[in-house]
Amino acid sequence: MRARIMSGYWCFKAPYGYRYERKSGHGNLLVRDEPLATIIQDALEGYACGRFASQVEVKRFFEDQPSFPKCLPNGEIRQQRVTDILTRATYAGYIEVPEWDITLRKGQHEGLVSFASWKKVQDKLNGKAKAPFRKDIAEDFPLRGFIACGDCGKPMTSCWSKGSTRSYPYYLCDTKGCDSYRKSIRRADVEEGFELLLRNMTPSRNLLSVARKMFADL
């Protein structure tokens, strides 16, 4: 088993999102197991790009998927399962077994995400802790996780700042070392700018006319 693993083949129980299939020239090889493969792929890529700001948000994403196996009778999954998925190199197409002194190496199977995306996940996990999940955050700040800081390029976060009589919504960069670290931008300014960007991307009337004729011809 050790020799086979050193050659890039996983020999243990197939991780969530994979199943074994016999392939010519390989023997048993990990292949995608849908729909779990796509669910886990979305979670890893979402965490890497900032769509999910914390492991708790990834956990809630898994719990919202009917096809994802649950740990507890109330439909929840344990946090440890989330951590195991986020840290498993198998999902990047790599394998490692530290207890057998087998270091990280390219596997023979196809990864669910790129190694670059998986590395972003590891860097994020090893960085500072993120704020806990808030159920209302998506409604209050719809662009959270989708807009990046103009100085460092990292996804921006958001917050409510309490004033003397009311609270005010802001987007801000929370990356230490960035020139814009903790500098707040009014939510209205960000979202109005985004709306203006969308309006500028609206196709011209002539282009729409050509598109209609193309679809009619098809």
Image: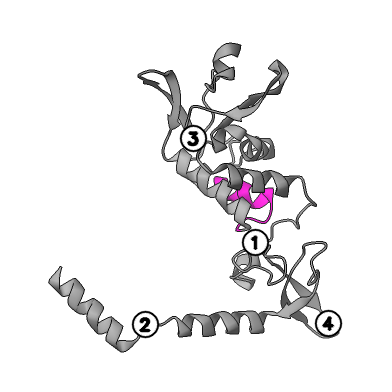
Q: Residue furthest bottom?
A: 205
Separation of marks 1 and 4 at Cα, in angstroms? 22 Å
Amino acid type, residue under disc 4 in the picture? Gly
Q: Which mark is residue 15?
A: none
Separation of marks 2 and 3 at Cα, in angstroms? 40 Å
Q: Earlier in the sequence, mark 1 or mark 4?
A: 1
Residue density around tag 1, few if under 14, some if 14–19, many if 20 or more, within 10 Å: few
Q: Quadrant of residue 186?
A: bottom right
Q: Start and end of the magenta stretch?
A: 51-63
Provide residue 123's location: percent of width, then percent of height. Answer: 72, 47
Residue beneath the point at 69% across and 43% down: 122
Q: Which residue is mark 2?
A: 203
Dominant SS type (magenta): helix
Tag 3 and tag 1, C-beta contact below 8 Å: no
Q: Which residue is mark 1?
A: 135
Q: Foreground: 78 or 208?
A: 208
Q: Which residue is mark 4?
A: 163
Separation of marks 2 and 4 at Cα, in angstroms? 42 Å
Q: Earlier in the sequence, mark 3 or mark 1?
A: 3
Tag 2 and tag 4, C-beta contact below 8 Å: no
The mark tally for this picture is: 4
Amino acid type, residue under disc 3 in the picture? Gly
Above or below, 121 relative to 195: above
Q: Which residue is mark 3?
A: 17
Q: Element at badge 1?
A: loop
Q: Nearer the viewer, mark 1 or mark 2?
A: 2
Above or below, 54 relative to 161: above
Left or right, 50 with respect to 111, comes to: right
Q: Nearer the viewer, mark 3 or mark 4?
A: 3
Tag 3 and tag 4, C-beta contact below 8 Å: no
Q: Is residue 3 visible?
A: yes
Q: Element at badge 2?
A: loop
